[in-house]
Image (tube, grey):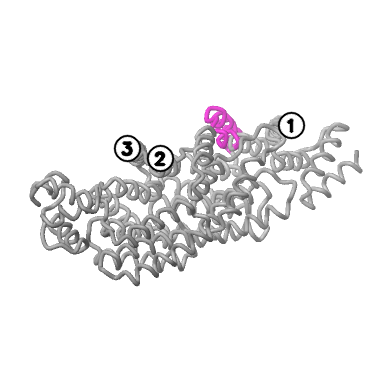
């Protein structure tokens, strides 16, 4: 047994998790392992995806420590049983283990008191009570520092950071997350805590759209996972994060490959694939124009518990099902209260509203997005807000006002290294130039956008550019959807005042639309605009 046990311990030190699991299991069959070696076996089970074995080992460790009168270590095993139950959303089981652990150490001054504060902080975060979460995490950090427990300190610091993010104190929150990640990167933490903190911190960075940090920590997580080929516990999440970054950077085939790997990478037991991987598949396939495959991916995401939005709503819009797209995105936005989640939904909401000429709704959402960008204060949100503002102003017929936010958005997307978003802004800038009679610059903007779309394989965007080119070459004016709507009402003989009333817009806005229409058509009057529209079949 000693040889097998030593082999298992040596394999554990080398992070050869499958080998360690096998050797420790054999040693355990020959003679039951003691507390320390049971912990090693449990860690190997967790990291190799043997969830049921991990739970059985923890239960054994708990009862073994109880029998030996070691209540603190029994409470530590109960903490892990509670934590894994929480991760499975088994709240009743988790509460039972936490209550038992609390009774075991209620009169003891031990580090486990700090560990039991971690689930409490998580619960407060789930309830959107950032102040209570921060207080619980701060107490846990103090216990960890007093006992010199690096795992507890790092986990508590990261929870403090998440609580600050939840309260809107983004920079201070990110600083605490950075501190926790430093401990993970430098090997100060146990393997399971290292993976948990990596994943949680990257999720938090993605939530607040801190793209540069998400890139940095995802690269570090990838390196850590690659050094441990046996590990399954965190590799699926790592692949999803890598795929998200690759999509941002415009490496769509690589992103799709990583997301597909994540969907298929399962543990030897029945661990579910990450639902976010299916959603990401759907996003890339939609952008590439593979509508049926994207639809299937979104459905798989929903099946595994991920709300496939706003991607599915954008897919409905791409299919020409505007009413369904509007109904879907309105439902999701109206049901979402978390400001970070709303910030991710609003750009799609604005795009869909503009596609249906609901400029007023888009403008209202744009104002909210701008306010969120100011409060959260990350580069991605500022770029999204400027992008949306330019699109709204252009759709509303105010091309001159649209120029500044679009230029600002383009510069930010360029600096962030997000080529697809930058190219889409260039299409809008081309539309601005056409509206202002600058066909030469419009051609440059469209040409630059086309080159990026070709490189990315963004087929739907190329098709839309082809339609613009065709319209431009035929010398048909590039009227916005709102301007076409106004032109139809002009042709119906309605006054500016009645048009404003019908479209729920100000009369001043309609005056501007009419002026733009006359300029673009090159006609002197409303009657001439009506005649031109019928002659050239503009509607």
Mark 2 vs mark 1, foreground winner is: 2
Image coordinates for residue 4, horizontal then vertical, percent: 89, 41
Would you say residue 102 sits in the magenta stretch?
Answer: yes
Q: Which residues are magenta?
A: 84-107
Quarter that holds the N terminus: top right
Which mark, residue 316?
A: 2
- Mark 2, other Cα within 10 Å: few <14 / some 14–19 / many ≥20: some
| Disc with the residue nearer the chain's start (3 vs 1) | 1
- Mark 1, other Cα within 10 Å: few <14 / some 14–19 / many ≥20: some
Mark 3 vs mark 1, foreground winner is: 3
Horizontally, is 412 left or right of 492 in the view?
right
Would you say residue 85 sits in the magenta stretch?
Answer: yes
The residue singled out by tag 1 in the image is 64
Front-lying residue, 74 or 43:
43
Which mark, residue 323?
A: 3
C-alpha gap between disc 2 and disc 1: 57 Å
| Disc with the residue nearer the chain's start (2 vs 1) | 1
Specify whether residue 517 is in view.
yes
Image coordinates for residue 270, horizontal then vertical, percent: 66, 32
Residue 383 in which image quadrant = bottom left
Circle 1: element type: helix
């Amino acid at each position: 047994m000693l040889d097998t046990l030593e082999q298992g311990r040596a394999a554990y030190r080398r992070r050869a998790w499958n080998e360690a699991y096998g050797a420790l299991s054999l040693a355990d069959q020959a003679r039951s392992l003691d507390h320390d070696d049971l912990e090693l076996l449990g860690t190997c089970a967790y990291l190799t995806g043997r969830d049921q074995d991990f739970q059985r080992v923890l239960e054994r460790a708990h009862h073994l420590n109880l029998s030996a009168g070691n209540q603190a270590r029994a409470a530590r095993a109960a903490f892990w049983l509670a934590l894994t139950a929480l991760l499975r959303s088994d709240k009743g089981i988790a509460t039972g283990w936490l209550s038992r652990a609390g009774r075991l150490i209620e009169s003891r001054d031990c580090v486990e008191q700090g560990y039991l504060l971690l689930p409490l902080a998580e619960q407060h975060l789930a309830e959107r009570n950032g102040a209570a979460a921060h207080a619980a995490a701060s107490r846990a950090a103090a216990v960890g520092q007093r006992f010199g427990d690096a795992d507890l300190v790092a986990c508590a610091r990261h929870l403090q950071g998440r609580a600050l993010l939840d309260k809107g104190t983004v920079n201070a929150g990110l600083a605490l997350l950075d501190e926790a990640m430093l401990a993970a990167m430098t090997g100060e933490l146990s393997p399971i805590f290292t993976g948990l903190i990596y994943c949680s911190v990257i999720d938090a960075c993605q939530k607040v759209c801190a793209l540069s940090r998400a890139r940095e920590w995802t690269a570090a997580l990838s390196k850590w996972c690659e050094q441990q080929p046996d590990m399954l516990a965190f590799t699926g999440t790592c692949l999803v994060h890598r795929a998200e970054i690759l999509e941002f950077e415009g490496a769509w085939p690589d992103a799709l490959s990583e997301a597909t790997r994540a969907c298929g990478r399962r543990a030897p037991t029945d661990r579910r694939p990450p639902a976010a991987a299916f959603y990401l598949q759907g996003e890339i396939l939609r952008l590439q124009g593979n509508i049926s495959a994207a639809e299937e991916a979104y459905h798989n995401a929903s099946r595994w518990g991920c709300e496939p939005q706003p991607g599915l709503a954008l897919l409905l819009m791409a299919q020409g099902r505007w009413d369904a797209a509007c109904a879907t995105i309105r439902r999701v936005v109206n049901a979402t209260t978390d400001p970070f989640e709303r910030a991710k939904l609003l750009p799609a909401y604005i795009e869909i509203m503009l596609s249906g000429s609901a400029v007023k709704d888009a403008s209202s959402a744009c104002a909210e997005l701008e306010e969120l960008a100011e409060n959260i204060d990350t580069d991605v949100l500022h770029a999204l807000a400027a992008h949306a503002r330019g699109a709204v102003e252009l759709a509303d017929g105010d091309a001159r006002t649209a120029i500044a936010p679009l230029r600002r958005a383009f510069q930010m997307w360029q600096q962030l290294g997000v080529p697809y978003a930058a190219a889409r802004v260039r299409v809008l800038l081309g539309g601005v130039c056409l509206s202002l009679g600058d066909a030469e610059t419009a051609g440059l903007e469209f040409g630059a956008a086309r080159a990026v779309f070709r490189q990315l394989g963004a087929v739907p965007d190329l098709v839309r550019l082809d339609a613009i080119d065709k319209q431009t070459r035929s010398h048909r004016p590039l009227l916005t959807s709102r301007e076409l709507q106004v032109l139809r009402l002009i042709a119906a003989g309605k006054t500016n005042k009645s048009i404003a009333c019908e479209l729920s817009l100000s009369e001043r806005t309609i005056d501007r639309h009419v002026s733009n229409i006359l300029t673009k058509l090159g006609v002197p009057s409303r009657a001439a605009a009506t005649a031109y529209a019928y002659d050239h079949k503009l509607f």
